[in-house]
Structure formats: structure tokens, C-alpha cells
Amino acid sequence: MLALALAAPAVAAPFVPTDEAQVLERLPDRSAVEYRDLKRLRAVAIAEPGNVDAATALADAYYRISRREGDPRYLGYAQAALTRWWDDPDAPTAVLVTRATLLQSSHEFPRALADLGKAIARDPNNARAVLVRATVLTVVGKFDDAEADCERLLGLTRDLYVLLCIASVDAVTGKAQPAKAALERWLAAVPDAAPEDRSWVLSVLGEIAQRQGDAAAEAHFRAALAADPDDLYTLGAYGDWLLEHNRAADVIPLVQDKQRVDALLLRLGLAQTALGLPEAQSTVALLRARFDASRRRGDTVHRREEARFQLLLNGGAPAALRLARDNWTVQREPADLRILAEAARATGDAGALDAVRQWLATTRLEYPAVAELVK
Amino acid sequence: MTQRGLRTLIVALLLVLTHGIAEAHKPSDSYLKLDVDGASISGQWDIALRDLDAAIGLDSNQDNAITWGEVKAKHAEIAAYALPRLALGPAGAPCVPVLGGQLIDHHSDGAYAVLRFTATCPAAPAILDINYQLFFDIDPQHCGLLNLSSQGETRAAIFCADASAQQFPLSGQSKMAQFADYIAHGAHHIWIGYDHILFLITLLLGTSFQTAQVSIRKAMTESAKVITAFTLSHSLTLGLAATGFLRIPVSLAESLIAATIVAAAVNNIRPFLTRRIWLVALFFGLVHGIGFANVLTDLGLPQQSLLAALLAFNIGVEAGQLVIAAVALPLLLLVARRPAVLAHGLVAANGLIAVIGAAWFSDRVFDTGLMPF
């Protein structure tokens, strides 16, 4: 039913349904754990409008749902929970940290870093602020600063988070081997770890293996998904691994019912196209409509996905290069480098090829597939 | 927060944090189509069922599925929620929408309620004011995507929380109506531009205190010189900036305008610039003209009748300015004729003005938020 509704043409004519029982829209399952607290938190926040704890708790709850659902609407609801302080440069520390968490979701990294810097200056032992900053710094490719933050965390938070923090930096700075060893040691030492901890460690391991061309990646991704089947990020990473290994048919059941999420709809479109399925056409039309809408509102959050769409599904290599390059100025994860390298290769753009080579040389990122693209 | 609570939070946050930041799907948008034909506007407004559910609750039986029956039962509520959040036409003379019907459509990210309406304006608008307020209170990241057509010409615009009120000059409307609309906008701008009003009053305060003791005639002449000088100089920069010959960032112009107020007020107390206030008006008027031009640029200039629009807007500004002078000057003269007031009043009034100007300046340069407007 949902698939049918979503498969409708991107721009159809308005109509009056004939059947009252016809389901027009599915909502997220609000019996899920993330929603349970929401009602209570909302009631408290409404009853005490100036209460910082209540407002940030509500915003954090919305933030978690936005990640779970991959739906940015909840980022807007979270922002609304912080309305009173949203434009206040000297907001309370808890607000600064939550606001930074929301800002980094919208790729507003400089503003997020400014908020976090202020929060940490006020409260150097604020573990969450330091963790979020380390993450943002890793995403924007400032690895030395990220590592310094990871080390700062020692004793402030659980050892696992320090381990993951450092391993995430090591994994992309020429120390993939030690990172992998440390994570594997942890898995062996803590066999009864909580599923969310395991899933996180396994997905980092999966990505390291994927970049190294190690077939163990699949086992890691599958184990991560066994621990947390709805993790959108791991679904995307595993989907990419399958596509890379000519197993498009396995991608479809993985992402079929997650078409709301642009990044996963993109994987579905790639798989359908690789298999020559007739549905590919409507998926591509749907993707085009979504990217058009986000361009109309001036969004730049989707550039990595849109670059892949342009290059692989829309025959627009120059447009892909432009998007990949703009995206690269904002975020610098291996996936961002890869699409930049692919677009550079497709267009033969010397400047972009050189930028990729230089990044590989200076960071010592171990990613043979990308190195091959720019050889 | 307890240690355990903190840990749980960090796990939950970090799990999703490191896990890629690019997993978003389409944010909340509505699609608004307006077709202007004379005084009548036909509209179609597509609003996501998911957003309406968050605002007023559509899933009556709480089964996480919205059926056509549930939407139909809420038709009146949907209209009562949405329509008042869209204002067409100027505040004083709104184009009132009447709902035609509600349908359903699918966009790339799901099902939308489609509201069709017809709005009738008191007269054919030459500039269409649109104020869009849907969902901003619950979702400040929501935006409305507008497609506006008039006389076969279509344009697109986007309403987000930081750009919720916009104006669109409509081509094909009568030249006279367009001219009158620009006059009205010019007058309106000086009327709501507290900084311009305060600057003008400061200048008039200076001339009346200098000359009122001499003769009313002398005071009137000096004030007329000030107003003429201000008009000439701000017209010059307004014209240059509006046509693109002069480009100065809005924030810089706004800050300089605040600084001119402080300088003019201090100059009234202690003439450190010049005793000839018309010279102050002439010089600082250049800065105020740039401020006017920024408003005109926001309005959007019809390219085919650029000069006419510029002239009309300026006529509006001057008319508004004359009205303010006509009210303020007699009062100022009345006060300035009293020797007792003259001694202390000059310093007190100008001191207060300088403080207000300085607060504006601080707000505009350092974002301090001292002033309520």
C-alpha cells in the first residue's frame, strides 16, 4: 500500500479519493520507544516555558527521532522547543550543546563549533559538548583538533566512547589497522555489550573493511544490523557495499520500505537501474523531484547524495562535479572524497583530481578504490 | 542529570551523530500556487498531511495511518488552521480567501491536502503583499514554495521563517495603480522607519532651538532648507543605489544611519561638525538614501518602469516626511520659544536622542539587542 502510494508519479493531478478507508499516509510508529517520553516532555516544556532542562530534554528527544526516522521535520520541532534561546549567542550551556547538535545536523558546522567552543570554555568537563565537537571536527576533516578532543574525554565518559572517538579519527588518518585491532579487542572483551554499543562498533569496523576492500565488511554490516535493524546509516553503508560488489538484487529488500529517506531511495534507484528494472524510471523521477524541491528552498544538505544522483542516474557529470566540490568544502568524510573522485574522473577535471590526490597524501587515508580513481 | 541519565543520552546521541550526517529526507514544505487576475486571486495550496497531523492531529484512531475518512472529517479544522495563516493583500485592505474545495495530491515525499480557494481584493493590486505564517511556530524550518502567475508571467519565491512577508509587483496592472502603490510604500516606509523620523526630528530640533528666539520666520526658513537638503541628498543616493550604480551592504548602511543620529544630536548640543544644520542634512541624507534604496530593492522593481517606480517611491517618502515635519515643527517651535526650556531642554532632548541612536548603533553593529525595534 505504502509502496503503491509512493510509486505514484511525482507530480500527479489533485484528486478526491472515493474510498474513506483508503490510507493516504503512513506515520512513524509512535508506540516506538523514542515517542514514549515525548508526550511527557512536551507537557513539562509547555507548563514551564523558561525551564532550560525541560526545553533541552524535549529538543534532544525530537533530535533522536529525527535521526531514527531520517526526517528533518523533527529538527524543526526541536528548534521550536528552543525558540526562546535560538538566536541568543549567550544561551545557557545546555542550550548551546543541544543547539550545536541540531546545527550540525543541518551541516551548519561553523556555527555548531562556535556554540560548542563557548560551552566547553564555560564547562571544560562537559563530556557531551566535547564528544559532539570531536565528531564535528572529524566530519570536517580537522583531525588533529578532533584527536585532541578525544583525548580530553579520557575519564570524562565511558572508555568505549573514548575508544570510538579515537578509532574514528585513526580510521581515516592512516591508522586503520590499529583502529580495527582496538575495536575488535573490545568486541572480544565485552561479549555481553549492549546492542547499540555493539552496532556502533561493528559499523565502524564495517566501514574500515569496506575501504580496505576486505570481504569481512559484509559480516560486520550484517552483525551491526542484527543488533540494530533500523540504523539508517548502516543500511546505506551496507547498500553501497552490495552495489559495489554487483549484488544489486540484495539491496532492494534492504531499503524497499525506507523510501522516505532520500539517501536510501538513492540506493534503491541505483539497484533498480543496475538490474534494469522498469521501476527504476519512477524512482529516478521521484529523486529528481525531491532534489528539485530542496534546491528551490535553498538547501545544501543533500549535495553528497545529489552528486551521486547526477553522476550515476542522471547523466550529469559536470553537475555532479560542481555538487561534489561544493559538498567537499563543507564536509570531508571518505564518502565525500569518493564522490568527488568519481566526478573528477568522469569529467577529467585536473583540479579536482589533484585535490583528491593531495587529501590522500596528507591524511594518509587508506582507500585503494579512490586512489585507483585518481591514479 | 544523573550520571546514568547522562550516559544514556550520550549513547543515544552519539550513535546517531557519528552515523552520518547526510541521512535526511525532504524537509517540510508546502506548495502555494497563486494566479492573479485583476482583483481576483485563485489559489491552490498543497500542505503535507504529516505536517497537518503534527499541528492539529489527523490520525484520529491513532493507528499510525491517515485515511481519507480521517482527513475528510477534519476538513473544517484544516481550513480553519491554514487559511488564517496566509494573508494576501495589504494589512488594511486584505484579499479575503474563500475555500473552494479540498482534494488530495501526492508529492515526492507523500500525500498532501490540497486547498483550493478564491480570494477577492478590494481593487486589483499593483503590488501583492503576501504574509505566510504556516507552521513556523511549531517548525521554524518549514518553508512555503510559491508559484505566482499574473498576466501570463510566472515567478517563484520561497517563504521561510526569516522571510515570511514579501511583496510582488505585478506587471500588466495599470500604470497609475502601480505608481500609486509605490507612493504608498514610500510613505509607509518613512512612517515605520523610526530611525529616519528620529533623524529628521533631530535636525528640526536643531534649527528650531537655534532660530526660534530670533523669529518664527527665520526658523521656518531654516527648517525648509534642512528638509530640502535632506530630500536632495537622499534622493541622489536612493536613485544611485536602486539602479545599482552604488552598492553598499544593508548592515553597513543601517549602522551608519544610527551613527548619523548620534552625530546630529551631539552636533545640536555642541556644533562639532557645523552650525549650519542644512549641511548636516545634506551630508547625512546621503546615508539615509541608501537605507531607502534597500527597502525599494526588497520590494522588487519593475524593470520596464524603473524610473517611474523610483520617482513614485520617493514622492511617497517626501510626502511622509512633510507630514511628520508639519506635526513636529509647530510643537518644537512652541517649546523652543520658552527661554526656560531652551537652557536645559536642548541638552536633555538631544542627549536622549543620542542615547537611542547609540543603542541602535550597538544593536546593528554588535547585535546587542538593546532596542525593542
Image (cartoon, helix red, strand yellow):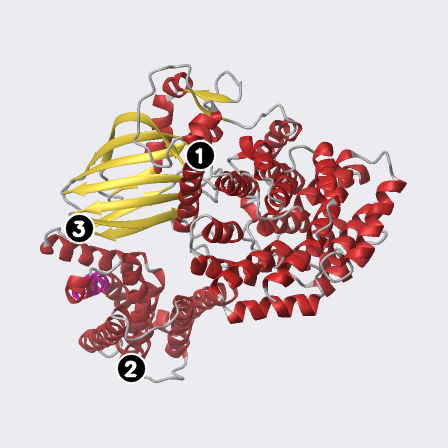
Q: Position of residue B188 (x, y in %)?
A: 25, 56
Q: Residue at x 50, y 16 (%)?
A: B61
Front position among marks 3 and 2: 3
Circle 3 sits on which residue? B126
**Viewer-proximal residue among A348 and B357:** A348
Circle 2 sits on which residue? B279
Q: Position of residue A241 (x, y in %)?
A: 64, 45
Chain under label 2?
B
Query: Would you say B319 lies left or right of A280 here?
Result: left
Span colored in magenta: B311-321
Q: Residue at x 31, y 72 (%)?
A: B203
* Image: B355 above or below A50: below
Query: Would you say A268 lies left or right of A169 here?
Result: left
Front position among marks 1 and 2: 1
Q: Position of residue A141 (x, y in %)?
A: 66, 62
Q: Main secondary structure of the magenta part?
A: helix
Q: Amino acid at mark 3?
A: Ala
Measure the alpha-carbon separation of dots 1 and 2: 74 Å
**Dot 1 alpha-carbon crowd within 10 angstroms: few under 14, some 14 to 19, many 20 or more:** few
